Amino acid sequence: MFQSVRARLTLWYTAILALVLITFSVISYAFLARAIRAATDASLSDTAREFAGAFSAEPVAPSDVRLDFRYSDRELMVFDPRGDIVASSRTHMPAPVRQHLTLAVRDGLRGFQTFGKFRVFAVPIDVLGHHYTAVAAQSFKTQNPRLRAAGRAVILGIPIALLVAAAGGYLLARKSLEPVTRMSAQAREIGAGTLDQRIAVVNERDELGFLAITLNELLERLQRTFESQKRFMAEASHELRTPVSIIQGEADVVLGRPDREPAEYRASIEIMRKAALNLTRIVQNLFLLARSDAGTYPVHKSRFYLDEVLSDCARAMRSAAVSKRIDLTCDTASDLAMFADEELIRRLFLNLIDNAVKFTPEGGRVSIQARQDGAHYIVQATDTGPGIPPADQSRIFERFFRGDRTRRRVAGAGLGLSIAKWIAEAHGGNLRLERSDASGTTFTVLLPAMLPPEVSVEVVEGLAQRL
């Protein structure tokens, strides 16, 4: 029963209200009893003082006075110094209580005192040269009916109030949680094929409206991620199909003709080897991107020099550049110390230089330049290729994107730039397209520099701004 939120809210609401009502009732009962006690004390004091004042005005021996007391809820007694009662109204005080009162009068009783179930007030009076004590007494039984009535009202009123409050609280909780139930039903209907649906927002300015907006934003992110994954899988399958088809086709050709020349076998095997290398490269890139998306790719940082890595990358790509008669140059500052993952940084610039060499026509130029600017290193890769069409420039870092037909004819899966951009961002840097037009293309890489321990980034940036 109490697994329901409505039931738990009602239970907590009722329990808190019960605690409040009980506390209020106990405090109110205590204040009522105290007020009744104070009223009783005031009445007894007034009665005793009025009686004493009457004797002072008309001195008469108490033994000669007959006390015909007009109040039926209290008693009046006059004691001599020895504690004997010399005058008394009609009394209902039990003998043991009266004996205690007599002893107290002998000891000089004054003011208020409680004897058993009686409250008394004693005041001294002087009559005809003799000292007496006038005592007004009232039983607590006269207070009990009012207190019992208050107690019955509390005992009967609290359960009725709690029942009404529980019913109202349940209805209120049900009404308040109705939008949550409706949102849950709508969310339950949303699946992989209906991620474009959204939860209705009734009032965007209250908490439930904020919850609905948050869930819709979550669904929006899930939809984008899901569509990206679907597109990624489809494009990956398409890219993997080409080298697999090449390998399978060449294998069928080799096995279909047992009398082929050794040179033909070598040519087929070379084709299969290149296709296998391409397939391996695609699988490795997909594996890297998958782990980077999951945030589980290990980044092993160490100290090295960026200028040395750039020189090695240029030398590694020089043979591909020479085959197309491309002038590949690398002009970097010296001692560009870095603290990063050297293997990933090397892969970043190999992808960037390879991309530049691929799309630069024969006889063109590719230049790599690196310099330090404050707390960052700026590396620029410039080529003299045909440039990237303006319509494609915003998408060049998307996975498997290769733009127009001219760029699609160049071998590759369209993953190099997306991997390079991820590597730069994983190291706190950035990769952007600086410019691209008919005269060529320039990519700029921004990477954090490794500064000496005694020089802070703020100091270097401040010096760079002043210079």
Image (tube, helix red, strand yellow):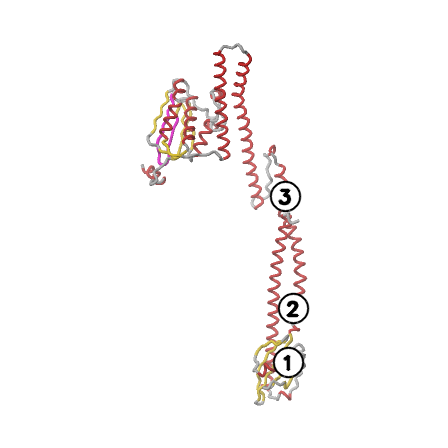
Principal secondary structure, stretch drawn in magenta: strand
Q: Is residue 365 above or below residue 51?
A: above
Q: Amino acid at mark 1?
A: Arg
Percent of width and height locating residue 207 = 57, 46
From the viewer's perspective, tell me whether residue 278 is left or right of residue 3: left
Percent of width and height locating residue 349 = 41, 27
From the viewer's perspective, tell me whether residue 384 is left or right of residue 233: left
User: Which quadrant holds residue 131?
Assistant: bottom right
Q: Residues within 10 Å of mark 2 (few under 14, many from 20)?
A: some
Q: Residue at x 60, y 40 (%)?
A: 200
Q: How many marks?
A: 3
What is the C-alpha distance between the residues marked 3 and 2?
49 Å
Q: Magenta region: which residues?
A: 365-381
User: Which quadrant holds residue 327?
Assistant: top left
Percent of width and height locating residue 308 = 36, 28
Which label was assigned to residue 273?
none
Q: Earlier in the sequence, mark 1 or mark 3?
A: 1
The residue beneath circle 2 is 147
Which label was assigned to residue 98?
1
From the viewer's perspective, tell me whether residue 304 is left or right of residue 19: left
What is the C-alpha distance between the residues marked 2 and 1?
26 Å
The residue beneath circle 3 is 181
Which quarter of the figure is the C terminus placed in?
Answer: top left
